[in-house]
């Protein structure tokens, strides 16, 4: 992150809320917390927030309703939802409501931090598209596609994702992984067309020490790095023929032979592949192996081009205008005439091209809202299509049971945050937080609950659920 990013955490589980707050504060985020959707909206009214990370299942206003209201009232704020393993349908609804990404609750702390940090970079520095924007689902074409996802996500079969450049093929791959039984395992994405051919074999399959000049240490390839999880091979049509043979062996035998080794290594990985090219045509010209094609295309998804999902363009345009306006420090909207103009353009580059055009309109237009006069003024210079018409922040009081600004001092020596070490699931981090606080409070549950900012009855229930009820002394009861 190039500057301090503010994040609002929303969850009715107070301890998880505080635990996540400590994690994000240690990573340099400015952290706000709310125990309900209504409290989150109150904070958003008077505080500048870049990203909201919200649970979906909450009493009163749930995360789905909160996301929809934020889309209307605070379109520049990026929303990420925390989901359970079996909540793909709800997750898709959240995407339709305006969420930009989602994380399973089983994700480890590194995955959570990395996802939020990448989103922050995209929001603040315009480093790239927010991929899940491609999941606007008003159109019948996208409804048809999304309706297939729940069954496919639960399968372990390989999937071939086809579609034009910029349609959101990687979005589909990440969605399938995040709602699959492998969600808490690695998702490794590699662009086969971006790897130099002389490095491709080592990148994919790894190598042993001394396998070739310069191989001073062994390397774990992308396939083994995805062990237990999902490997996404983008632009798989660009994979050289000799590596297609090796990939076929991985799919057949579930094992990898690193470069320079004769010892196969077992691997458990689900492979998702994507391409914008016609693999059947490449088979006819001997550029792609037919046996590999049939192994990859056990299941197939075709992501429709934007011209076939024009009902989604208005939602996407509003989202992009809000986001890129926020980057420029203002709230920017589009007139209905501009939205109609956007809806009739061909968008050969699909969602990616639409976002680029909206970004230029937002940054270079003289008016707010952006009007057709701005489109006409910019068309010849920076747009690819002709312009044919068809305060300062207030502080929120905080305290036990009340959301507020979280000021976390740097972790002292011996503090839990300095002892956590490798990435771990959030549930394990919560457990460690409770144990460490119990120990600091000499086993006194009342003092521990006060230190954690939760009710004593809530602590007792968490101790029971975590199997800690009989393990710790309970002095001062």
Image (spheres, rainbow, N blue to C red):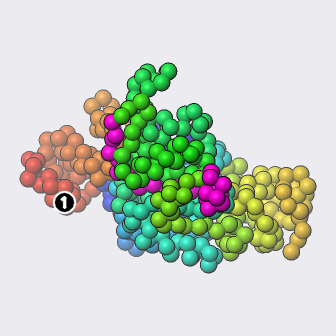
Based on the picture, tell me whether residue 325 belongs to the magenta stretch: no
Graded by Cα atoms within 10 Å as few (under 14), some (14 to 19) or many (20 or more), the crowding at tag 1 reads: few
Task: Measuring from the top left, give residue 157's x and y in whole percent.
Answer: 41, 63
Provide the residue designation for mark 1.
465
Instruction: Name the quarter where the N terminus is drawn.
Output: top right
Is 257 situated above or below 313? above
- Residue 476 vs residue 195: left or right? left
Residue displayed at 78% across by 66% down: 346
Task: Measuring from the top left, give residue 15's x and y in whole percent.
Answer: 30, 54
Instruction: Report the front residue among 135 and 333.
Output: 135
Q: Tell me if I can see residue 225 in this picture.
A: yes
Task: Measuring from the top left, give residue 409's x and y in whole percent.
Answer: 39, 36
Q: Tell me if I can see residue 102 in this picture.
A: no
Task: Measuring from the top left, give residue 207's x and y in whole percent.
Answer: 43, 32
Instruction: Report the front residue among 124 and 385.
Output: 385
Residue displayed at 75% across by 61% down: 348
Residue displayed at 45% across by 42% down: 222
Based on the picture, tell me whether residue 280 belongs to the magenta stretch: yes
Instruction: Look at the numbered disc 1 and give the secondary structure of its residue.
Output: helix
- Residue 26 vs residue 137: left or right? left
Extent of the magenta region:
263-287
């Amino acid at each position: 992150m190039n500057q301090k990013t503010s994040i609002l955490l929303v969850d009715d589980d107070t301890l998880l809320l505080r635990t996540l707050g400590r994690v994000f504060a240690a990573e340099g985020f400015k952290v706000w917390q709310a125990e309900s959707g209504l409290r989150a909206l109150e904070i958003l009214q008077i505080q500048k927030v870049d990203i909201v990370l919200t649970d979906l299942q909450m009493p009163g206003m749930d995360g789905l309703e909160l996301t929809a209201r934020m889309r209307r009232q605070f379109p520049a704020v990026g929303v990420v939802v925390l989901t359970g393993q079996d909540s793909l349908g709800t997750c898709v609804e959240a995407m339709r409501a305006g969420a930009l990404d989602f994380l399973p609750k089983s994700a480890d702390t590194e995955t959570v931090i990395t996802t939020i940090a990448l989103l922050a970079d995209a929001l603040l520095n315009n480093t790239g598209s927010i991929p899940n924007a491609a999941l606007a689902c008003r159109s019948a074409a996208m409804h048809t596609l999304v309706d297939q996802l729940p069954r496919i996500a639960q399968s372990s079969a390989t999937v071939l994702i086809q579609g034009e450049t910029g349609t959101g093929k990687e979005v589909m791959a990440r969605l399938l992984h995040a709602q699959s039984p492998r969600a808490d395992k690695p998702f490794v994405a590699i662009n086969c067309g971006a790897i130099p051919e002389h490095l491709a074999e080592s990148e994919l399959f790894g190598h042993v020490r001394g396998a070739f000049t310069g191989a001073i240490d062994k390397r774990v390839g992308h396939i083994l790095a995805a062990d237990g999880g999902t490997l996404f091979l983008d632009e798989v049509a660009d994979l050289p023929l000799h590596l297609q043979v090796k990939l076929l062996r991985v799919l057949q035998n579930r094992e990898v032979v690193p470069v320079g080794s004769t010892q196969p290594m077992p691997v458990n990985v689900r492979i998702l592949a994507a391409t914008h090219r016609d693999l059947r045509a490449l088979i006819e010209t001997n550029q792609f192996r037919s046996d590999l094609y049939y192994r990859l295309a056990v299941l197939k998804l075709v992501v429709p081009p934007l011209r076939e999902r024009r009902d989604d363009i208005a939602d996407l345009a509003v989202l992009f205008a809000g986001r890129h306006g926020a980057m420029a420090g203002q709230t920017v909207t589009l007139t209905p005439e501009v939205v109609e103009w956007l809806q009739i353009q061909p968008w050969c580059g699909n969602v990616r091209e639409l976002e680029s055009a909206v970004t230029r309109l937002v940054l270079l237009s003289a008016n707010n809202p952006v009007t057709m006069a701005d489109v006409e003024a910019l068309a010849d210079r920076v747009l690819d299509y002709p312009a044919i018409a068809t305060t300062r922040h207030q502080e929120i009081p905080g305290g036990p049971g009340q959301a507020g600004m979280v000021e976390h001092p740097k972790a002292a020596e011996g503090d839990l945050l300095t002892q956590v070490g490798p990435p771990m699931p959030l549930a394990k981090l919560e457990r460690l937080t409770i144990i460490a606080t119990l120990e600091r409070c000499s086993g006194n549950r009342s003092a521990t609950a006060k230190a954690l900012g939760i009710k004593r009855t809530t602590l007792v229930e968490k101790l029971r659920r975590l199997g800690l009820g009989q393990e710790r002394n309970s002095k001062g009861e």
